[in-house]
Image: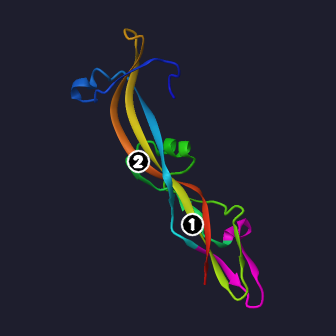
Amino acid sequence: MPHDGADYFETEIKADEENEERISDFVTVYGYQYTKGSLKSGAWRNGTSGGSSTSSAKLSLNYTQDTSYNISFKASVSGGYTNGGTIGSELGVTLGASKSYSLGSGYSVTVPKGSHYLIKYRPMYYTYKVVETKYKERYNEALGGMERYVVETKTCYVDVFSHWDFTHVAK
């Protein structure tokens, strides 16, 4: 955060023609507020399948099979924002880009004799609400601290991968 330890005096005055000259010597800074939403799930994807008619079998989907499956998730963004690089770096993603995530230890299930199972997996993610506020600020000697004016706010929503969810179904 800029100016750590400084006192701020925020004013909710919009920059308009009347105030533009008054705040022209201010510097522009951005502030961000991140609110983590609830956990959501993406669409199910098909993994491996198998079974045996003569004995029970173990069926697994794990990190050794990562290259065989669609393990990507797109950090999608909707709404308005100015500094996507700042927002993305704070959330650990690149906005609008797909990234592959390992299946980790994966999932295993014992398939009973005579059955055939399909392992399915889906991405789990959080949607963050990001409020970006553009300020004009300067040091004000008379106030003994920073003087700050809100110029504009924008809100966007960013989907950020959390983990994979697994299940199996009889086929």
Residue 156, position as x, y percentages in the image:
40, 47
Which quadrant of the view contains residue 57? bottom right
Q: Which of the pair 76/103 is nearer the observer?
A: 103
Residue 41 vs 130, above or below: the answer is: below
Q: Which residues are magenta?
A: 46-67
What's the residue at 71%, 67% (across, down)? 62
Which residue is tagged 2?
Answer: 156
Occupied quadrant, residue 106: bottom right
Which element is circle 2 on? Answer: strand
Quick one: label 2, few (<14), some, or many (20+) residues within 10 Å?
some
Q: Identity of the amino acid at label 1? A: Arg
Quadrant that contains the C terminus: bottom right
Give percent across and percent down for residue 64. Answer: 74, 68
Q: Is residue 49 above or below residue 80?
A: below
Residue farthest to the front?
A: 112
- Which residue is painted at 35% across and 38% down in the image? 153
- Which residue appears farthest toward the top when viewing the image? 142
* Kind of residue sitting beneath label 2: Cys
Q: Is residue 110 left or right of residue 15?
A: right
* Location of residue 108 by image quarter: bottom right
Residue drawn 37% across the image and 8% down it = 142
